[in-house]
Amino acid sequence: MTAVPLALIVLITVVDVLAPPDIHLGPLLIVAPALTASVAGPRTTAAVAVLAIAALTVIGILRDGVTTTNHQTQLGALLAVSALIVGLRVLRDRHERELAQVRSVSEAAQRVLLRPLPDRIGPLRLASVYLAAEAEAQVGGDLYAAARTTTGTRLLIGDVRGKGLSSLGDAALLLGAFRAAAHLHADLPGLVGYLDGSIAWDLAQLAEQQRAQQTRLQEQPRLQLPPLLRQVPRPPPLGEAPTAPTAAEDDSGESFITALVLDIPDDEAVVRLVDCGHPPPLLLHRSQERDREQGRDREQDQDRGRERGRVTPLEPGRTAPPLGLGELAPGPYEVVEFPFLPGDRLLVYTDGVIEARDTGRRFYPLPERVAGLTAAHAGEPPAALLHHLRRDLLAYVGGRLDDDAAMVVVERF
């Protein structure tokens, strides 16, 4: 690409030398380093700038001389603008290096925080996709994880209040608590209670720190420790549900995590879930094409009242408060059970998907879109379905989301 600026230098020099005395094309030589800066580094740009200055000097020697006021003015302007272009190119390279470092750190954080889900776990096939709202981050406040137990597979998907890198701390806390405790609690209510208590305890610590900082700023040099700070709760032992602070003790209710916790047993064709303020999952009933491929009889599913190829939201009768606000729950966590037969798929997602809008400010119609994509690409694996869904979502919003979004497809085989 540097051949074009060099050709321009030669062309402008020749034309200027051959032009009438009242026509001066030398100032156009600045185009050469400007074009070079857009395609090459600062060293190449500086070299082209030196050639442009040399060409302008040659023009002066062959025409009016290098000592004329006009030529010296052109030479000084070319030198100043060339130096500015090279300096801007240096700053651009520095910014690109910093951006590459940010992306590298983001990728490392994503690998540690959001471990890739296995393609197969027990009798399930999994696929996942994450779309961060911040351009320089590949991970944010949406999260998902899967864990094996002695009887099946447990899946977590959640959305931390906020977006981007600022929500990583709460996401890391919840993922760590889930991975540590998913196999220790026999029932879902116990697991969800532990997760809620862990989040509430952490938010209480954050509130205590904020209040302590405010107290230190307001008090005189003679600092009196508030009694509240002497009652900092201790973290619970693993396997026991922490006691969440009451509303009177904690004002951190502005922070929370919506979550969906699922339990898929190996030996039962069902899925059990607890919904903590999260969008309901979508059940993608297996298609008739898959029935014919696997030799299943049509009447087998008619007795169960199911419709092939349809998308059904699995909405529980009552949702629990988001994690961190468990004390607001009117009663124990409610576990809801739905049929989940071989060939069926579950799509779990965060609200960044359904709250995405097009240029007309219309929300993304996820059930309709996924139904159409499932019908158009019947028989493809879960990863292919997510690929089509991701591309359709980004095309719908014009290429960039306003909020983090995550999607996971689970298929029983």
Image (cartoon, helix red, strand yellow):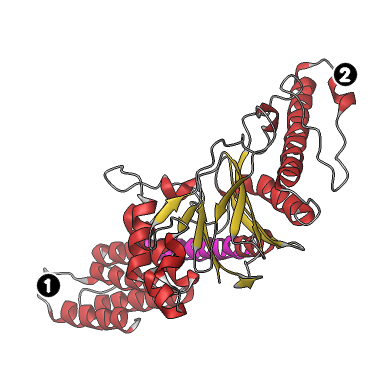
Residue linked to disc 1 = 21
The reply to whether the magenta stretch includes residue 100 is: yes
Looking at the rendered image, the disc whose residue lies closer to the viewer, 1 or 2, is 2
- Would you call the spot at circle 1 few (<14 residues within 10 Å), some (14-19), or many (20 or more)? few
- Judge left or right: residue 312 versus residue 255: left
For mark 1, give the secondary structure: loop
Where 346 falls versus 173 (above or below)?
A: below
Name the amino acid, label 1: Pro
Q: In terms of image quadrants, where is residue 219?
A: top right
Where residue 283 appears, x then y in whole percent? 47, 56
Asked if residue 214 lies in the magenta stretch, the reply is: no
Most frequent secondary structure within the magenta stretch: helix
Residue marked by disc 2: 227
Residue type marked 2: Pro
Residue 109 x %, y %: 66, 60
Q: Position of residue 361 (x, y in %)?
A: 31, 42
Region in magenta: 81-104
- Residue 199, horizontal then vertical, whole percent: 72, 40
